[in-house]
Image: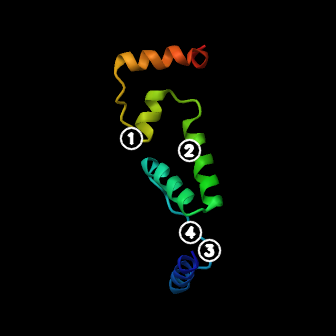
């Protein structure tokens, strides 16, 4: 982690920029970034990515969420129906 901060600091000094730059992350890569933040124990990044993904999911249908995050839906129609029966309260 210390080495990562040193590299980051040296790059910003080389570019002559004292401001923090913001990088755009592809929507399908956000879960990977969140997983990396968790693995590296970077709580602030984990909180930020989780909050961002929650905002992206809020109010969307399962199909829209699958499309946003490039999630393959491999449930059979029978499995889908079983999940709906087990979680009927969600669909009320």
Sequence order check: which comes first, mark 2 or mark 3?
3
Sequence order check: which comes first, mark 2 or mark 4?
4
Sequence order check: which comes first, mark 1 or mark 3?
3
Q: Secondary structure at mark 4?
A: loop
Residue 44 lies left or right of residue 15; in this view the side is: right
Sequence order check: which comes first, mark 1 or mark 4?
4
Marks 2 and 3: which is nearer the front?
2
| Mark 3 lies on residue | 19
Q: Are marks 4 and 3 in contact (CB under 8 Å)?
A: yes
Q: Secondary structure at mark 1?
A: loop
Closer to us: 83 or 34: 83
Q: Are marks 1 and 4 in contact (CB under 8 Å)?
A: no
Q: CA distance from mark 4 to mark 3?
A: 6 Å
Q: CA distance from mark 2 to mark 4?
A: 21 Å
Residue 82 lies left or right of residue 3; in this view the side is: left
Q: Secondary structure at mark 2?
A: helix
Sequence order check: which comes first, mark 2 or mark 1?
2
| Mark 2 lies on residue | 53
| Residue 87, numbered circle | none
Residue 70, percent across and down?
39, 41
Q: Secondary structure at mark 3?
A: loop
| Mark 1 lies on residue | 70
Q: CA distance from mark 2 to mark 1?
A: 13 Å
Residue 25, percent across and down?
47, 56
| Mark 4 lies on residue | 21
């Amino acid at each position: 982690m210390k080495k990562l901060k040193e590299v980051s600091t040296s790059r910003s000094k080389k570019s002559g920029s004292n401001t923090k730059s913001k990088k755009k992350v592809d929507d399908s890569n956000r879960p990977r970034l969140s997983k990396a933040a968790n693995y590296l124990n970077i709580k602030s990044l984990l909180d930020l990515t989780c909050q961002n993904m929650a905002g992206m999911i809020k109010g969307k249908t399962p199909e829209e969420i699958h499309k946003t995050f490039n999630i393959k839906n491999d449930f059979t129609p029978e499995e889908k129906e079983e999940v709906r029966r087990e979680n009927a309260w969600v669909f009320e």
